[in-house]
Structure formats: C-alpha cells, structure tokens
Amino acid sequence: MPARASHLPHHRERVALQMLHIRGELNSAELYPTGATTLTKMMDKGWVVRTQSGYRITEAGSVALKAKVPADYDKKR
C-alpha cells in the first residue's frame, strides 16, 4: 500500500483539524483520538500550533483540511 502524500491528512489528523476548525482552540484531551505523537507531527507540518491552553489550527492546517484526496487514490492501494 503506498503511503499517503504528506500534504494530505490521515484520519486522526483530519478529525483533529475538523474539530479545531469548528471549535477554535482545544486541549489534547478534547482532541481524542488524536494522541501526542500525531499532534507533534501535525506541529512539524505546520498544521497546528501549541498555545498556553491547547492547540489551534493554522492557515496551513486549513489548507490541508480542504485538500482533495485524488479520486484514484483508493485504486492504487
């Protein structure tokens, strides 16, 4: 199975980005099932930033959330 392109969020990343997009700033417990490792990787990608009270989506995170998965992606797997 080919790896998903790094600019496309996988399921847990997408769930976290959707929650942050809707609700604004959330702490790590509110972002379940997204764990600490996934949040760190999302920060490395520039999709979220850590704040004093939790995490916030960035402009790059909004772009990643809106990115379309290619129609033939599932056919390659």
Image (cartoon, rainbow, N blue to C red):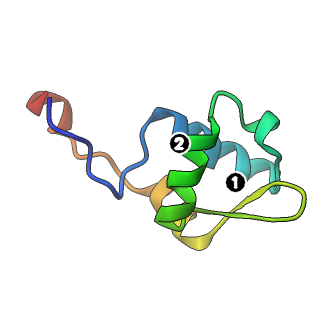
> What residue is at 63 percent from the left and 41 percent from the top?
36
> What residue is at 53 percent from the left and 68 percent from the top?
46
Q: Residue furthest left?
A: 76
Q: Nearer the viewer, residue 21 or 49?
A: 49
| Circle 1 SS class | helix
Density class for disc 2 (Cα within 10 Å; few <14, some 14-19, many ≥20) is some
- Residue 67 image position (x, y, % from top left): 40, 56
- Mark 2, residue position: 14
For badge 1, the amino acid type reads His
- Residue 23 image position (x, y, % from top left): 81, 49
- Residue 24: name its quadrant: bottom right
> What residue is at 50 percent from the left and 53 percent from the top?
41
> What residue is at 63 percent from the left and 68 percent from the top?
58
- Left or right: residue 18 compared with residue 12: right
Q: Residue furthest right?
A: 53
Q: Residue furthest bottom?
A: 59
- Mark 1, residue position: 21
- Left or right: residue 4 compared with residue 19: left
**Quadrant location, the N terminus:** top left
Q: In the figure, 44 relative to 41: above or below? A: below
Of labels 2 and 1, earlier in sequence is: 2
